[in-house]
């Protein structure tokens, strides 16, 4: 799994509210050009995500534990790519972790092909989320 985290000076509910406001994702996540999740951030909800580079992907919410975690997956040839989002309240602030995983027969191929790009992009996404969440608490 590829994972990065950031400490945010906002409570977990504020951070999670940004995830629930799906239309706002492109505002704070520079890797996302557009996204649609008509049923909202609910388990088994389906939609699509258009990254700034790469093809539009169908996504499905596979788990939600408000306000601490949610995961979405996308089907690739021979494997699933998942994005896991975790929120943990600490004495120093809220730790937000974004992780990407690949599972299935061709997971090693996709981890090698797109893993490095995702590894570079996750810290930028987290910084955008941090800025947006902290601006909401000012």
Image (tube, helix red, strand yellow):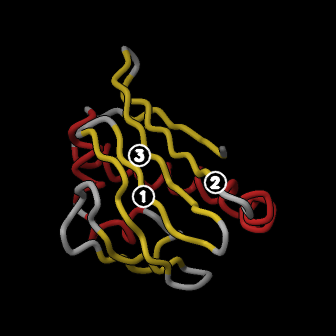
- Image height of 43 relative to 11, above or below: below
Residue 81 % position (x, y): 58, 61
Compared across the picture, whether 10 is left or right of 82 comes to left
Question: What is the secondary structure assignment of the residue under circle 3?
Answer: helix
Residue 35 % position (x, y): 36, 76
* Badge 1 density bin: few <14, some 14–19, many ≥20, Cα 10 Å: many
Of circles 1 and 3, which is in front?
1
Q: CA distance from mark 2 to mark 3?
A: 29 Å
Question: What is the secondary structure assignment of the residue under circle 2?
Answer: strand
In this view, which residue lies farthest toward the bottom? Answer: 55
Q: Residue at x 37, y 54 (%)?
A: 62
Q: Earlier in the sequence, mark 1 or mark 2?
A: 1
Q: Can the viewer see residue 123 in this picture?
A: yes
Q: Earlier in the sequence, mark 2 or mark 3?
A: 2
Q: Residue at x 52, y 77 (%)?
A: 51
Of the 4 image quadrants, the one containing the N terminus is: top right
Q: Camera-side residue: 114 or 93?
A: 114
Mark 1 and mark 3 in contact? Answer it, CB < 8 Å: no
Q: CA distance from mark 1 to mark 3?
A: 20 Å
Compared across the picture, whether 138 is left or right of 53 comes to left
Q: Which dot marks residue 6? A: none
Q: Can the viewer see residue 138 in this picture?
A: no
Which residue is label 1 attached to? 72
Count of residue discs: 3
Q: Earlier in the sequence, mark 1 or mark 3?
A: 1
Q: Which dot marks residue 130? A: 3
Q: Residue at x 47, y 47 (%)?
A: 84
Which residue is label 2 attached to? 103
Q: Residue at x 47, y 80 (%)?
A: 50
């Amino acid at each position: 799994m590829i994972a990065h985290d950031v400490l945010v000076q906002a409570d977990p509910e504020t951070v999670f509210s940004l995830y629930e406001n799906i239309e706002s994702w492109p505002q704070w996540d520079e890797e996302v050009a557009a996204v649609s999740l008509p049923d909202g951030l609910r388990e088994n909800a389906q939609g699509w995500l258009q990254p700034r580079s790469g093809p539009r992907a169908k996504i499905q919410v596979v788990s939600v534990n408000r306000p601490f975690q949610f995961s979405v997956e996308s089907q690739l040839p021979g494997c699933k790519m998942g994005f896991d989002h975790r929120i943990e309240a600490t004495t120093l602030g809220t730790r937000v972790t974004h992780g990407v995983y690949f599972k299935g027969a061709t997971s090693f191929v996709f981890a090698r092909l797109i893993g490095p790009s995702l590894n570079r992009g996750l810290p930028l996404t987290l910084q955008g989320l941090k800025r947006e969440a902290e601006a909401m608490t000012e």
